[in-house]
Amino acid sequence: MSQIRILIVDDNFVARRGLRSFLQTESDIAVVGEASTGRAAIDWVKGNDADIVLMDVRMPDTDGIGATSEILKLRPELKVLMITVVDEQATLLRALLAGAKGYLVYGQFTPEQLIEAIRATEAGSTVTIPQISPALLENIKSHLTGVQDITEMESMEPLTAREKEILSLIAIGKGNREIADALDIEEKTVKNHINNIYSKLQLKSRYEAISYILRRPD
């Protein structure tokens, strides 16, 4: 029987070892590596093989969503399953837009559901706990490619070219620090641009910004 090879990424040592100990009880699952930061996970996949990455969200240097984007650029065949304490729909949407195949929140799934989620992810399904509506999930899937074309959207005419650029980076899951680094500007400047975007588009949060992008005409 072939095994599902797992890389566990979490800055909490106890969480990593707990996951490893539990997953190793399953005959069809093998934990092949661990990483304590997003950057360490990116470096790991450059020289090692896995099938699924269990990825935390909040970590030092590069967070889990940023790491997911980078990992999938390097190894698009990998599947990333987020496993986190962050129960925010905006973060869930950012993770899926970054390419994650699933999103699990600690305390909202059983050990059995974790195993089922890993097997479903390997089979190509998208798994989210908390659940999101099938209609919204299909909408997200239909927009997983091409979101960076926002910079060419005439329907966002109120935005400046820089604001469209920042909105496109929000859409693919980038945080403020990552946007600042990508555009070589100060993080405070990014925050000012985001406030302007919210004001011009009458939005209140990152979740509403991502939802706005998903609702835009093709």
Image: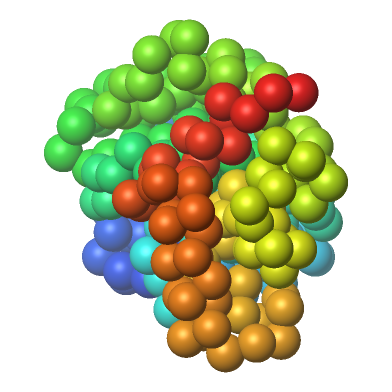
Residue 35 drawn at (x, y percent)? 52, 68
Image point (47%, 76%), residue name: 192
Q: Nearer the viewer, residue 79 or 6?
A: 79
Task: Check the image and name the residue furthest to the left.
Answer: 107
Q: Which quadrant of the rendered structure holds the N terminus?
A: top right
Q: Compared with residue 129, is residue 12 higher up or lower down, i.e. above or below?
A: below
Q: Give 127 or 52, whichever is nearer the viewer.
A: 127
Residue at the top extreme? 135
Residue 178 picture location, percent across and down = 59, 73
Whether residue 133 is situated above or below residue 94 in the rendered picture: above
Judge left or right: residue 157 versus residue 80: right
Left or right relative to 4: residue 12? left
Write the residue at 64% across / 56% down: 159
- Quadrant holding the C terminus: top right
- Point out residue 160 in the picture as x, y percentages from the top left corner: 69, 63
Please report the residue visible at 65 percent of the width from the left and 87 percent of the height from the top: 185
- The color scheme shown is rainbow
Could you tell me if residue 73 is visible in this image?
yes
Q: Nearer the viewer, residue 28 or 108?
A: 108
Residue 4 seen in render: no
Residue 107 in percent (x, y) is at: 16, 38
Q: Is residue 17 above or below residue 93?
A: below
Q: Nearer the viewer, residue 164 or 72?
A: 164
Residue at image coords 36%, 59%: 16
